Image: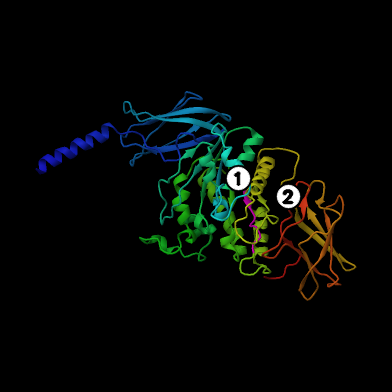
């Protein structure tokens, strides 16, 4: 009996070896988008030990990779300018077992990550809709060259080799369930550039930024600030999406080094109150991603958190955090920030106007990365202030035609004297200028100005292209 079972096992093992074929991570699939004009990474596994060949229909050149002792193989293939659809053939020499990827496009690929405001789908959350998306969903057509890859939530104590998530065409079902921010970003890019756009969406609502950073980076650059000893354990405990390194391990590490062109990021609410640390964390995150994915010049565009009352509408916590986010632009090369101070909603931390967010991120990419001319996508930022005759004259860093609206009172400004008590102020834009005059009858000798610096405030000041002025302060008073 034992001999029979043993022979049956050998026969079964032989069948597996004979029928073995190349396997790929799920995100190498039909409908995928590869980054144009680059050497795109492709990898997988084989248990035959044979060299693996990769051939594409855009060139016909055969690329060959030798598997390591664990059967993993890796190759980079030269991609052309944007176009398609193409096919990719992958084989390890096993007869009749060639793997074929169909309907592959070549274009621009963007990695999209963050917490719930990035995760919020086009169809919205229950009781929290995304504005104007019904027409977008029902009007989605597969022939539109936008492709979507949603990575399934997964937290892990150690870096995983694989993740779940395959590419989908631009269908109503696929559009409805993907990130609204990422989708509207991709839609605007595709509309303007007229080439295929792919988005890889890997996010988790409520996650802190340190969950998206690997152990090596946190240990070497934030020594003592995070307890990483739990990573040596056998079981993940606590809140998975706020535990350092765990989302990197489960939702980023398996994708390394998939070749993409740029990154967008919408996260921060979960890190409010850790302002100085956040600047360092965001810088470290970007440097880690650029290094691991071997894209040292990849642009990074992120969203400044929107106003929300939290536990105190008049509190300053959000203002100080938004200030930290703005400072990140100064220390992260090739980056930009999309301000959202004008589109917050008092009743929800998930503002419905996701098209505006996606469009503003796209404006940054189109101008700064793709070279489109004609608009200034940057939020005007505070430059200097002078005080005279009971008024403050605030000057902004900006290009273009000046601030808007001119000639009417601009809400959101506050002014304080030496007592550091802020009072609502009247503010007027100087026509055709980058200056605002601020004053209050309650503050005869002002020394400081703040704009939309409280947890709940509604931005009313813009550049000439509708990009809002980010929250700012002229003082350096501690929180």
User: Among all residues in the image, which is located at the extreme bottom?
Assistant: 419
Seen from the viewer's position, the closer of residues 310 and 478 is: 310
Horizontal arrangement in the rendering, residue 271 relative to residue 29 (left or right): right
Residue at 55 percent across and 49 percent down: it is: 121
The stretch drawn in magenta includes residue 301: yes
Residue at 64 percent across and 40 percent down: it is: 188
Query: Relative to 332, is 393 above or below?
Result: below
Give the residue number, with chain letter if any, for mark 1: 133
Q: Position of residue 451 (x, y in %)?
A: 75, 62
Q: Quadrant of the N terminus?
A: top left
- Which color scheme does this rendered protein use? rainbow
Write the start and end of the magenta stretch as one range.
297-308
Callout 2: 10 Å neighbours few (<14), some, many (20+)? many
Seen from the viewer's position, the closer of residues 4 and 177 is: 177
- Quick check: marks 2 and 1 in contact, CB under 8 Å? no
User: Among all residues in the image, which is located at the extreme left?
Assistant: 1
The stretch drawn in magenta includes residue 103: no
Q: Quadrant of the C terminus?
A: bottom right
Give the residue number, with chain letter if any, for mark 2: 467
User: Among all residues in the image, which is located at the extreme right?
Assistant: 389
Number of numbered discs on residues: 2
Instruction: Give the Cα separation between the discs numbered 2 and 1.
Output: 22 Å
Q: Earlier in the sequence, mark 2 or mark 1?
A: 1
Q: At numbered mark 1, what does the secondary structure look like: helix, strand or loop?
A: loop
Q: In the picture, residue 319 is in which quadrant?
A: bottom right
- Mark 2 or 1: the one toward you: 1
Please identify the dominant SS of the magenta region.
loop
Q: Position of residue 184 (x, y in %)?
A: 61, 43
Horizontal arrangement in the rendering, residue 239 relative to residue 378 (left or right): left
Please say whether residue 421 is visible from this viewpoint. Answer: yes
Q: Position of residue 464 (x, y in %)?
A: 79, 47
């Amino acid at each position: 009996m034992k001999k029979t079972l043993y022979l049956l096992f050998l026969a079964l093992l032989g069948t597996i070896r004979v029928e073995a074929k190349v396997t790929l991570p799920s995100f190498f699939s039909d409908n995928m988008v590869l980054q144009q004009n680059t050497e795109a990474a492709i990898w997988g596994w084989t248990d035959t030990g044979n060299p693996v060949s990769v051939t594409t229909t855009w060139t016909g050149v055969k690329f060959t990779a030798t598997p390591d002792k664990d059967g993993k193989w890796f190759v980079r293939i030269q991609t052309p300018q944007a176009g398609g659809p193409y096919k990719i053939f992958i084989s390890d020499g096993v007869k009749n077992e060639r793997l074929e990827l169909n309907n592959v496009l070549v274009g621009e690929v963007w990695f999209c990550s963050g917490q719930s405001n990035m995760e919020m789908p086009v169809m919205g959350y229950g009781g929290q809709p995304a504005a104007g998306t019904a027409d977008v969903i029902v009007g989605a057509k597969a022939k539109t060259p936008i492709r979507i890859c949603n990575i399934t939530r997964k937290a892990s104590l150690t870096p995983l080799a694989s993740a779940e998530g395959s590419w989908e065409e631009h269908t109503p079902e696929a559009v409805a369930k993907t990130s609204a921010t990422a989708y509207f970003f991709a839609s605007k890019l595709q509309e303007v550039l007229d080439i295929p756009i792919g988005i890889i969406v890997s996010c988790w609502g409520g996650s802190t930024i340190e969950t998206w950073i690997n152990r090596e980076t946190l240990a070497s650059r934030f020594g003592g600030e995070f307890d990483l000893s739990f990573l040596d354990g056998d079981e993940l405990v606590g809140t998975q999406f706020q535990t350092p390194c765990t989302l990197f391990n489960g939702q980023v590490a398996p994708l390394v080094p998939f070749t993409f062109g740029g990154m967008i990021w919408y996260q921060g609410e979960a890190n409010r109150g850790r302002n100085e640390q956040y600047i360092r964390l965001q810088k470290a995150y970007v440097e880690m991603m650029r290094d691991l994915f071997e894209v040292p010049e990849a642009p990074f565009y992120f969203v400044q958190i929107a106003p929300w009352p939290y536990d105190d509408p008049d509190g300053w916590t959000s203002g100080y955090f938004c200030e930290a986010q703005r400072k990140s632009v100064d220390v992260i090369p090739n980056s930009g920030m999309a301000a959202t101070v004008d589109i917050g909603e008092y009743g929800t931390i998930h503002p419905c106007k996701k098209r505006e967010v996606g469009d503003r991120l796209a404006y940054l990419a189109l101008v700064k990365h793709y070279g489109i001319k004609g608009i200034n996508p940057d939020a005007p930022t505070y430059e200097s202030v002078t005080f005279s005759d009971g008024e403050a004259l605030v000057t902004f860093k900006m290009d273009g035609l000046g601030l808007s609206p001119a000639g009417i009172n601009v809400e959101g400004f506050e002014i304080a004297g030496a007592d550091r008590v802020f009072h609502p102020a009247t503010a007027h834009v100087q026509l055709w200028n980058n200056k605002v005059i601020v004053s209050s009858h309650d503050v005869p000798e002002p020394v400081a100005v703040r704009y939309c610096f409280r947890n709940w405030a509604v931005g009313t000041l813009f550049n000439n292209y509708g990009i809002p002025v980010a929250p700012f302060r002229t003082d350096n008073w501690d929180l």
